C-alpha cells in the first residue's frame, strides 16, 4: 500500500539532520514515515556521516528537545523538519546536578 501514501504529508515527514560533522542528507530533505522512531533516522545519519560516539548528544527541533525513542508523530513533528543533533549544553548538565 505504498503507492498513494508514499508522499502523503500526513504519513511522512521531510527531515534533515544537522550534526557537528555535517548535515544528512547533504542537500535537501528525505522522507521518513511519521510513525518511525526518531532515533532510527539519527542512527542512519551518524552512520552516513561516520560519527562513532554520540554519548551525551541531544536532538532538538524548533528549539524543543526531542524524545528520540518516540515517533516523529509523537514528538509533534510534521511537514519539513530540521533536527539538530549534537552534544547537550553544559549549562543544562550543571542544572541537573
Image: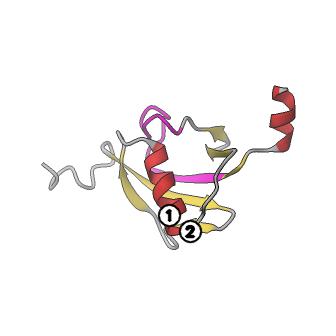
The residue range painted magenta reads 68-85
**Residue at coordinates 17% horizontally, 52% vertically from top-left?**
2
The residue that disc 2 covers is: 50
**Quick one: SS at disc 2?**
loop
**Picture coordinates of residue 70, whole percent (x, y):** 46, 34
Q: Is residue 93 left or right of residue 6?
A: right
Tally the marks: 2
Answer whether labels 1 and 2 touch (C-beta < 8 Å).
yes
Q: Is residue 79 left or right of residue 9?
A: right
The residue that disc 1 covers is: 47
* Magenta-span inclusion, residue 88: no
**Residue at coordinates 81% horizontally, 36% vertically from top-left?**
93
Residue at the extreme front: 52
**Type of colouring:** secondary structure
Mark 1 crowd level (few <14, some 14–19, many ≥20, 10 Å Cα): few
**Residue at coordinates 41% horizontally, 36% vertically from top-left?**
73
Residue at the extreme top: 97
Where residue 82 sits, quadrant-wise, is: bottom right
Amino acid at each position: 500500500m505504498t503507492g498513494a501514501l508514499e508522499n502523503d504529508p500526513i504519513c511522512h515527514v521531510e527531515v534533515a539532520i544537522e550534526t557537528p560533522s555535517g548535515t544528512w542528507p547533504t542537500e535537501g530533505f528525505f522522507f521518513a514515515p511519521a510513525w518511525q522512531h526518531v532515533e532510527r533516522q539519527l542512527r542512519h545519519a551518524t552512520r552516513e556521516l561516520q560519527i562513532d560516539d554520540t554519548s551525551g548528544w541531544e536532538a532538538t527541533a524548533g528549539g524543543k528537545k526531542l524524545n528520540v525513542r518516540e515517533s516523529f508523530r509523537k514528538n509533534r513533528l510534521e511537514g519539513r523538519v530540521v533536527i539538530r543533533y549534537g552534544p547537550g549544553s553544559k549549562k543544562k548538565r550543571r542544572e541537573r546536578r
